[in-house]
Image (cartoon, grey):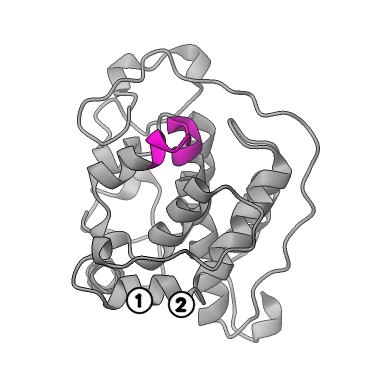
């Protein structure tokens, strides 16, 4: 990051190092090699002509064809990666269920979305600094844990979540408070993905304990300035939340 000539906080540089190490390690449902293949497909999706046609269409369902993939992931995983990367504002519950019907597990779905969120955050940070994308790390050996939280249930989202009151000790720490909002719960079907994502996101934005302290800022700009920028970026990225 220092190669950009722009001062970068040390905690940001360290958070990126930890995030890439986590991505390259075996996950909950994917091996390290599969996770790195997902990263490669995330980056490849930006140049997919089929995705461009979908994006330009009135309805994503009106376009026939196949994604230009790297050929290392199955069709359902490729569809998930490409649509999340290129047209996230028009995803739907029927679409998500169609991926499950094609053999993608709920846990794989959540883990891949978590990886996409982390990689796009870090790649866009590099772009803002005028730096090239970081080379893909070598995947680490090992098997996925295949841990599914016993309290996960489908309630307020397309896929099961773990409500704070349903979390158990085996899940590990997940929420900043017992009343954590749904934005914190989105990846909770895969607790490690949730922890990995928020460990990175909190350094880019704010740790949970500071979110509701609207009269303070722990960053170089004021809280209103942060929220104006966040709202604009969210709108440009079609963030429904």
Inspect this view and state whether residue 189 appears: yes
3D distance between C-alphas at marks 2 and 1: 6 Å
Reply yes or no: does residue 101 show up in magenta.
yes
Residue drawn at the location 77% of the way across and 48% of the way down: 139
Front-lying residue, 149 or 166: 149
Give the residue number, with chain letter if any, for mark 1: 53
What element does badge 2 sit on?
helix
Which stretch did the figure color magenta? Answer: 99-109
Disc on res. 233 = none
Give the residue number, with chain letter if any, for mark 2: 49
The outermost residue toward the front is 64
Number of residues whose C-alpha sits closer than 10 Å to that of mark 2, classed few (under 14), some (14–19) or many (20 or more): some
Position of 160 compared to 195: left or right?
Answer: left
Reply yes or no: does residue 123 show up in magenta.
no
Inspect this view and state whether residue 239 appears: no
Are the residues tagged 2 and 1 within 8 Å (C-beta)? yes
């Amino acid at each position: 990051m220092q190669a950009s000539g722009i001062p970068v906080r040390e905690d940001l540089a360290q958070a990126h190092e930890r995030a890439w190490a986590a991505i390259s390690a075996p996950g909950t449902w994917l091996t390290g090699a599969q996770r790195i293949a997902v990263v490669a497909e995330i980056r490849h999706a930006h140049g997919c002509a089929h995705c461009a046609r979908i994006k330009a269409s009135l309805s994503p369902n009106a376009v026939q064809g196949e994604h230009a993939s790297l050929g290392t992931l199955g069709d359902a995983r490729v569809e998930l990666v490409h649509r999340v990367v290129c047209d996230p504002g028009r995803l739907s519950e029927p679409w998500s269920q169609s991926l499950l019907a094609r053999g993608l597990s709920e846990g794989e779905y959540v883990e891949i979305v978590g990886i996409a969120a982390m990689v796009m955050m870090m790649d866009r940070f590099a772009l803002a600094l005028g730096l090239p994308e970081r080379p893909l790390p070598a995947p680490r050996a090992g098997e996925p844990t295949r841990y599914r939280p016993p309290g996960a249930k489908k309630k307020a989202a397309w896929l099961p979540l773990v409500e704070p009151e349903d979390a158990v000790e085996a899940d590990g720490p997940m929420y900043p408070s017992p009343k954590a909002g749904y934005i914190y719960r989105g990846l909770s079907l895969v607790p490690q993905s949730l922890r990995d994502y928020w460990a990175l996101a909190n350094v880019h934005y704010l740790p949970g304990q500071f979110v509701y302290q609207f009269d303070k800022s722990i960053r170089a700009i004021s809280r209103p300035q942060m929220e104006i920028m966040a709202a604009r970026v969210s709108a440009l990225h079609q963030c429904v939340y």
